[in-house]
Image (cartoon, rainbow, N blue to C red):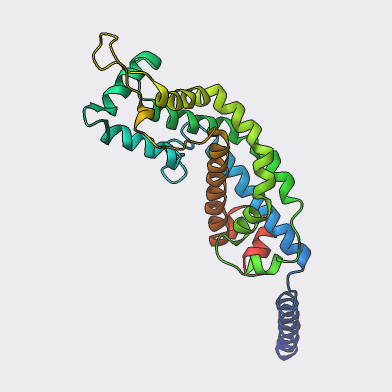
């Protein structure tokens, strides 16, 4: 009786072992399809974009993030440096003229620092407008490079998305950034920065003569800052998306998504 029971148990164990082995074999021979890869990549990018926009659109989302903080355009930074170091005829420091200018035009507040703050506030205010624009771009992802993206570096999906959509995203996002910059005063501040070049300063204080920074400064400032700020705002968002992609690749099981687990979890 005991022998028969043992035979039955051994038989059942053998059957279950075969079933488990077959199940494992099926999983091991069930490679990802292109449609699954695309779905996983799109979902990962969607999560990355949502988290990134939430982060960037918060107060100080750009301004206090040293990696994506929008700094002065090179030409404007060059002007700032020249104001601090150069003079007219070696007699009248440009810094003195600048101090006189901002006392009249900006209540004595530094235009360059205010421009940095206003540009970053503009990017923060516009960031949430990017989400639907980015979302539409995700739907157009081709399957041609899907496997290469999956097997690529830790930001391969973000890099691909950036390269494929950057021009269209700029065109769609630029009006929102420009509106936001106007709302934070960045455009007006920049107008005052440019206006400094033609400021007439009387070093005697008696109205006898005047000098202008344009007499000695050879700078070619951008016509506006909205295009620069738009590009920097987009670059900042993509940097954040890249960080999110790295998190997903490092731990695909932390997001509650079966397709992300399958695509990034070693299927």
Q: Residue furthest bottom?
A: 3
Q: Nearer the viewer, residue 193 or 89?
A: 89
Q: Position of residue 154 (x, y in %)?
A: 55, 62
In this rendering, does residue 108 appear at all? no
Q: Which residue is rendered at x = 74% and y = 45% of the image?
A: 136
Q: Which residue is rendered at x = 54% and y = 39% of the image?
A: 228
Q: Which residue is rendered at x = 75% and y = 82% of the image?
A: 12
Q: Is residue 182 left or right of residue 207?
A: right
Q: Position of residue 255 (x, y in %)?
A: 61, 52
| The quadrant where residue 10 appears | bottom right
| The quadrant where residue 25 appears | bottom right
Q: Residue furthest front?
A: 208
Where's the N terminus, which quadrant? bottom right
Q: Is residue 118 left or right of residue 158?
A: left
Q: Is residue 199 left or right of residue 120?
A: left
Labels in figure, total:
0
Where's the C terminus, which quadrant? bottom right
Q: Nearer the viewer, residue 214 or 53?
A: 214
Q: Position of residue 104 (x, y in %)?
A: 36, 13
Q: Position of residue 192 (x, y in %)?
A: 45, 22
């Amino acid at each position: 009786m005991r022998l028969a029971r043992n035979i039955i148990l051994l038989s059942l164990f053998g059957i279950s072992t075969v079933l488990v082995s077959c199940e494992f074999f099926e999983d091991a021979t069930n490679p990802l399809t292109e449609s699954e890869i695309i779905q996983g990549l799109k979902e990962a990018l969607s999560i990355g974009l949502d988290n990134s926009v939430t982060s960037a659109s918060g107060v100080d989302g750009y301004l206090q993030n040293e990696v994506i903080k929008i700094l002065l355009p090179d030409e404007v930074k060059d002007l700032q440096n020249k104001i601090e170091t150069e003079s007219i005829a070696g007699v009248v420091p440009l810094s003195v003229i600048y101090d006189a200018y901002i006392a009249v035009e900006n209540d004595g507040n530094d235009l360059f620092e205010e421009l940095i703050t206003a540009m970053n506030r503009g990017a923060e205010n516009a960031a949430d407008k990017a989400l639907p624009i980015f979302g539409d771009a995700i739907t157009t992802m081709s399957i041609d490079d899907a496997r290469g993206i999956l097997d690529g570096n830790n930001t391969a999906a973000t890099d691909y998305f950036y390269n494929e959509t950057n021009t269209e995203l700029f065109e769609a996002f630029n009006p929102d950034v420009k509106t936001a910059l106007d709302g934070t005063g960045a455009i007006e501040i920049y107008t005052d920065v440019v206006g400094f070049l033609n400021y007439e300063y009387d070093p005697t204080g008696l109205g006898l003569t005047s000098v202008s920074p344009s007499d000695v400064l050879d700078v070619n400032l951008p016509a506006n800052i909205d295009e620069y700020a738009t590009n920097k705002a987009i670059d900042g968002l993509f940097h954040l998306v890249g960080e999110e992609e790295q998190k997903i690749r490092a731990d695909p099981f932390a997001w509650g998504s079966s397709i992300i687990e399958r695509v990034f979890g070693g299927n």
